[in-house]
């Protein structure tokens, strides 16, 4: 199999991991479709004493790329007692290196490049899905190659990936983007009808008693 064919198959596999959002048509809007799900059992927060919002996302997901600018505008409106955490998910083995990419950027205090990853994959159509291409991309962004590679393969990053996988399972995530609120609620654009209404629903749920 050629390298190009392998990349094509990898890309197809990654895209399948992204939820296919079915937005509500006007006629369907009349139905009493739940705007959120109650998580059972409720999950403890990793930040005790704070309200918590988890964004389950995948860099390969076009809906995650589309909602990212809205999240960047919405986050500053969250109250001071709310902790927002992005959680990269892997629905199959080919997505693990993208989880490591996020946590490597986080560990190196380079999450300013987080939106750039979406742009690279979805706008520039570059398939930075495996370790080799990811490390090369990071070096192109001005990050020291050796430092990034060491971080990418570190125990600390792997531990964060393991925790992300635990959260994905605990919150019963089967598509992205999806939001967990205070360990009790799950919200996604497919439930609310569009991207902004999902964020509005998260804001509303944050005001409910814990």
Image (cartoon, grey):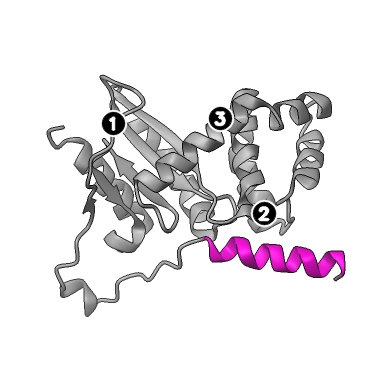
Find numbered disc 2 in the image and state the secondary structure of the residue it sits on. helix
Q: Residue furthest top?
A: 49
**Vertical order, 37 against 87 (above or below):** below
Q: Earlier in the sequence, mark 1 or mark 3?
A: 1
- Residue at 82 percent of width and 26 percent of height: 146
- Seen from the viewer's position, the closer of residues 38 and 61 is 38
Find numbered disc 3 in the image and state the secondary structure of the residue it sits on. helix
Quarter holding residue 9: bottom right
Q: Earlier in the sequence, mark 3 or mark 2?
A: 2
- Residue at 42 percent of width and 46 percent of height: 168
- Residue 10 circle label: none
Q: Residue furthest right?
A: 2
Does 133 appear in magenta? no
- Seen from the viewer's position, the closer of residues 109 and 200 is 109
Is label 2 in contact with label 1 (beta carbons under 8 Å)? no
Residue under pointer 2: 121
- Residue at 24 percent of width and 45 percent of height: 185
Residue under pointer 1: 44
User: Which numbered disc, 2 or 1, marks the residue closer to the eye?
Assistant: 1
Query: Where the N terminus falls, by quadrant?
Result: bottom right
Position of 184 compared to 18: left or right?
left
Q: How many marks?
A: 3
Separation of disc 2 and disc 1 at Cα? 34 Å
Residue under pointer 3: 159
Q: What span is colored magenta in the figure?
A: 2-17
Can you give x and y, in whole percent of width and height, for residue 152 in the image? Answer: 70, 32
Can you give x and y, in whole percent of width and height, for residue 163 in the image? Answer: 48, 34
């Amino acid at each position: 199999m050629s390298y190009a064919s392998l990349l094509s198959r990898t890309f197809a596999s990654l895209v399948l991991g992204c939820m296919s959002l079915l937005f509500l048509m006007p006629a369907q809007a009349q139905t009493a479709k739940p705007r959120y799900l109650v998580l059972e059992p409720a999950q403890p927060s990793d930040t005790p004493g704070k309200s918590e919002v988890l964004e389950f996302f995948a860099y390969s997901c076009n809906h995650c790329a589309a909602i990212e600018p809205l999240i960047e505008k919405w986050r500053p409106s969250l109250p001071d007692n709310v902790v927002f955490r992005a959680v990269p998910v892997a629905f199959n083995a080919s997505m693990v290196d993208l989880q490591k990419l996020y946590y490597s950027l986080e560990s190196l205090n380079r999450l300013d490049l987080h939106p750039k990853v979406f742009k690279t994959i979805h706008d520039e159509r570059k398939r930075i899905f495996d370790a080799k291409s990811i490390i090369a991309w990071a070096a192109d962004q001005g990050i020291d190659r050796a430092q990034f590679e060491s971080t990418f393969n570190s125990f600390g990053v792997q531990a964060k990936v393991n925790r992300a996988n635990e959260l994905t399972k605990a919150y019963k995530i089967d598509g992205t983007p999806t939001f967990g609120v205070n360990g009790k609620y799950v919200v996604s654009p497919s439930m609310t009808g569009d991207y902004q209404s999902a964020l509005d629903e998260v804001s509303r749920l944050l005001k409910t008693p814990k």
